[in-house]
Image (cartoon, grey):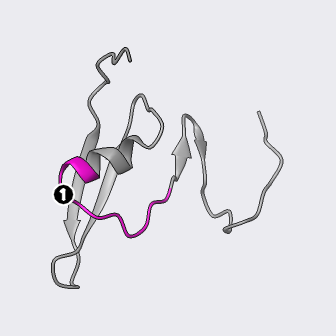
Amino acid sequence: MNCAPLLPAEIEARPLREGDRSLLRIVLHQGINRQIRRMCADGGLTILRLRRVRIGHLALGTLPSGKLRPLTE
């Protein structure tokens, strides 16, 4: 398998009030299948919830879970 190097990810951690839990904000500039899950597993972290909020310039915004809307230019 040919593994080309990936661009670095930007990671910001915010501790939560619930014991040893933290909220991570991860920005990928290039992505591969399950990259965030793999990175966290390599660091010994357990993912409880993973939410994509943007792809390129297309942001989720206030769109409710399970809903869709037509794309605009």
Assess whether residue 50 is covered by the magenta stretch.
Answer: yes
Q: Residue at x 17, y 84 (%)?
A: 19
Q: Is residue 43 above or below residue 14?
A: above
Q: Any magenta on residue 7?
A: no
Residue stretch rendered in magenta on the structure: 41-51
Residue in front for this viewpoint, 47 or 25 = 47
Q: In the displayed structure, would residue 17 be above or below residue 1? A: below
Instruction: Specify whether 31 is left or right of 8.
Output: right
Residue 22, image quadrant: bottom left
Residue nearer the viewer, 19 or 38: 38
Crowding near pointer 1: few (<14 within 10 Å), some, many (20+)?
few
Residue at 23%, 53% (x, y): give it.
Answer: 12
Q: Is residue 71 left or right of residue 19?
A: right
- Magenta region, main secondary structure: loop
Q: Is residue 16 above or below residue 8?
A: below
**Between 32 and 29, the one nearer to me in the picture:** 32
Quadrant assignment for the C terminus: top right
Residue behind mark 1: 44
